Amino acid sequence: MSDTTPADERPGAQSAAAYIADLTADLARLARRNGLQTLGYILDMARIEAEASSGAGRDRERANGAPPQ
């Protein structure tokens, strides 16, 4: 049996994405501190995607004065 429910609709998907965003932020910092600039960049892209999936990006936009969508 396959799981065909989109990730956004699965229970816990937002909290999993938020956790992934936290982890990738830490890993990106670690990579950059050790001279791994490209890896840091890729991890930041993963963090941005995870934040968008978790809804964190929308919260940050509102905090910066952007109107809600």
Image (tube, rainbow, N blue to C red):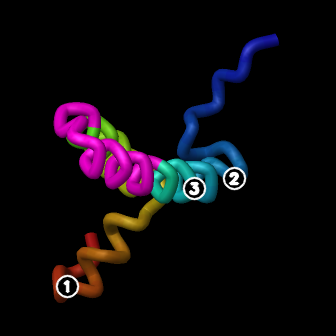
The disc, 2 or 1, on the residue closer to the chain's N-terminal end is: 2
Q: Is residue 31 magenta?
A: yes
Q: CA distance from mark 3 to mark 2?
A: 11 Å
Neighbor class of circle 3 (other Cα within 10 Å; few <14, some 14-19, many 20+) is some
Q: Amino acid at mark 1?
A: Asn
Give the residue number, with chain letter if any, for mark 1: 64
Question: Looking at the rendering, in which quadrant would you find the C terminus?
Answer: bottom left
Which residue in the protein does label 3 denote?
19
Closest to the observer: 30 or 66? 30
The mark that comes first in sequence, 3 or 2, is 2
Q: Earlier in the sequence, mark 1 or mark 3?
A: 3
Badge 2 amino acid: Gly
Q: Is residue 32 above or below residue 61?
A: above
Which stretch is magenta?
Answer: 24-39
Q: Is the stretch drawn in magenta largely helix, strand or loop? A: helix
Residue 39 has which mark?
none
